[in-house]
Image: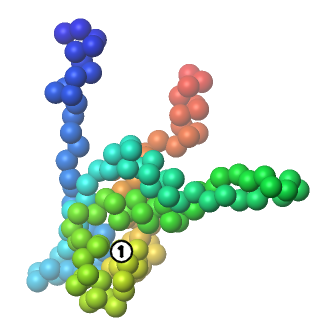
Amino acid sequence: MSNFAQFMKKNKVVKENVTFAATASLTDEKGNPVLWTLRPISSKENTELRESCMREIPVKGKPNMFRQKINTGEYITKLLIASCVVPDLYDAELQDSYGVSTPEELLFALVDAPGEYDAFTNFIQKFNGFNVSMEDKVEEAKN
């Protein structure tokens, strides 16, 4: 097989959806945590999410100059929402049951323990390939 042929779509591994118990406070009839279905997001979707969370920040001491800064908390929340298949965080009936009106509010209502939210965030980031820090990449490049 030539190098070119190795890049053909038929050779690409497709990442499947996974399940994860995002919170222990939602349980089934046997008392087991309810599993959420999560999907991988694409690089394009991730770029769109990041760009939607960018803000122009004035540069101190330099009038009319700005730099971009990402609102990390907003980005993480959007990443979690984009990854959720079940539950559907856009479902109006589910939102109504919690007295909220946006997917962001619903996510925080469903996963309301800070430790669980952090664990969910870590799981989603690793699932989407964010498991190597920039420091690790720099160290690897040096070797």
The front one of 143 and 90 is: 90
Question: Residue 99 appears at what percent x and percent y?
Answer: 34, 91
| Above or below: residue 47 compared with residue 94 | above
Q: Residue at x 41, y 70 (%)?
A: 117
Q: Which residue is disc 1 drawn over? A: 103
Name the residue furthest top.
2
- The vertical placement of 104 against 6, above or below, is below
Q: Is residue 43 visible?
A: yes
User: Disc 1 marks which amino acid?
Assistant: Pro
Q: Residue at x 27, y 13 (%)?
A: 4
Colour scheme shown: rainbow
Relative to 127, say whether 87 is above or below.
below
Locate residue 53 relative to residue 81 in the image: left or right: right
Where, by quadrant of the figure, is residue 3 drawn? top left
Residue 98, horizontal then vertical, whole percent: 31, 88
Q: Considering depth in this image, is 142 or 90 the residue closer to the camera?
A: 90
> What is the x, y in percent for residue 30?
11, 81
Residue farthest left in this picture: 29
Q: Where does residue 74 sit, x and y in percent of width and height? A: 50, 66
Measuring 86% from the left and 53% from the top, which residue is drawn there?
62
Please name the residue shown 21% across and 55% down the image. Answer: 18
Height in image: 57 above or below 47? below
The answer to whether 31 appears left or right of 113 in the picture is left
Q: Residues within 10 Å of mark 1 (few under 14, many from 20)?
A: many
Tag 1 secondary structure: helix
In the rendered view of the protein, which quadrant contains the C terminus? top right
Q: Look at the image and tell me in which quarter the N terminus lies.
A: top left
Taking the image as drawn, is residue 128 in sight? no
